[in-house]
Amino acid sequence: MTTETFDERVKRAKARWLKRVMYQSEATPFQKSLAYAIADHLNCVTLDCWPAQLTLCRLLGGVCTKTLQRASSGLAALGLITISRGAGIRYAPVFQLGDEDKPVQKGGQISPNVEDTDVRESFLEIHLTSDSTAAVPASGRRGSAEGRKYRRSERGKVEIELAKFLGSDGFEILARLSSINDALVERLCRAFACGQLGDRELMAARLAAEQVRSR
């Protein structure tokens, strides 16, 4: 059986979330249009998006920013999205556990799988003083540790391989993602160990890291 990529799993979660918004929620027609725009801009690594307010206003028919803000606040009040504010505004769909998986499950919001309880050991807080002996994955390869069970106690080793997969600035990218939420790096490490990362995921990770640098 072919291993699914991280992006493919997130696309399934996004489709299920959007279906709930469209068919099972009390969202207004305009709020549903905004939900579609959020899904359309979703970053598969960070599970949120940060389009400029003026961009959203233009895409949604030239509405004013006040109308956009009321719609996003309405979606948040319905428990369909979360909103965070910093240098910009970030919108995140509220997924349910199992949304990424093929079997439909009921539960709360998506979070990194944490079934093993090993103490996390990350290299992001350690100055790397020597190169890893791990081979650099070939271009397009979906993780150099394909098929390996991920253990949180080995996260540091996986980070080294993942950083090389991301490129020469791989550790800088991981550090920026960790500054948003360390759970993002945990998810990437787990996906990498399971052979679920490809070019689309790398592009999404770089885009998210670049957004942090531009704050």
Image: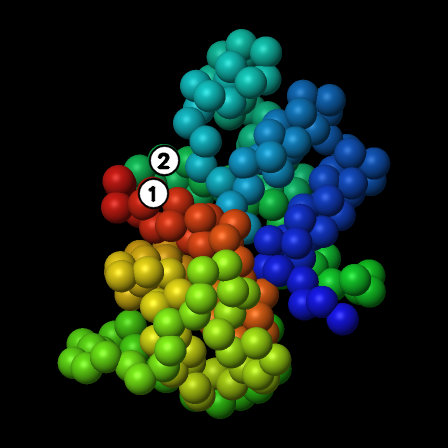
For residue 106, above or below residue 10: below
110 or 192, nearer to the observer: 192
> Label 2: which residue?
88
| Amino acid under disc 1 | Gln
Q: Quadrant of residue 73?
A: top right
Q: Position of residue 114 (x, y in %)?
A: 57, 78
Q: Comparing marks 1 and 2, which lies closer to the viewer? A: 1
Task: Give the secondary structure at mark 2.
Answer: loop
Q: Position of residue 5 (x, y in %)?
A: 62, 60
Residue 114 in sight: no
**How many numbered dots are placed on residues in this image?**
2
Look at the image and tell me in which quarter the C terminus lies. top left
Task: Give the secondary structure at mark 1.
Answer: helix
Residue 211: which disc?
A: 1
Q: Which residue reaches farthest top?
A: 62
167 or 45, nearer to the observer: 167
- Give the colour scheme of this rendering: rainbow
| Amino acid under disc 2 | Gly
Q: Position of residue 77 (x, y in %)?
A: 62, 39
Mark 1 or mark 2, earlier in chain: 2
Instruction: Name the residue located 79 percent from the left edge and 62 percent from the top edge.
Output: 102
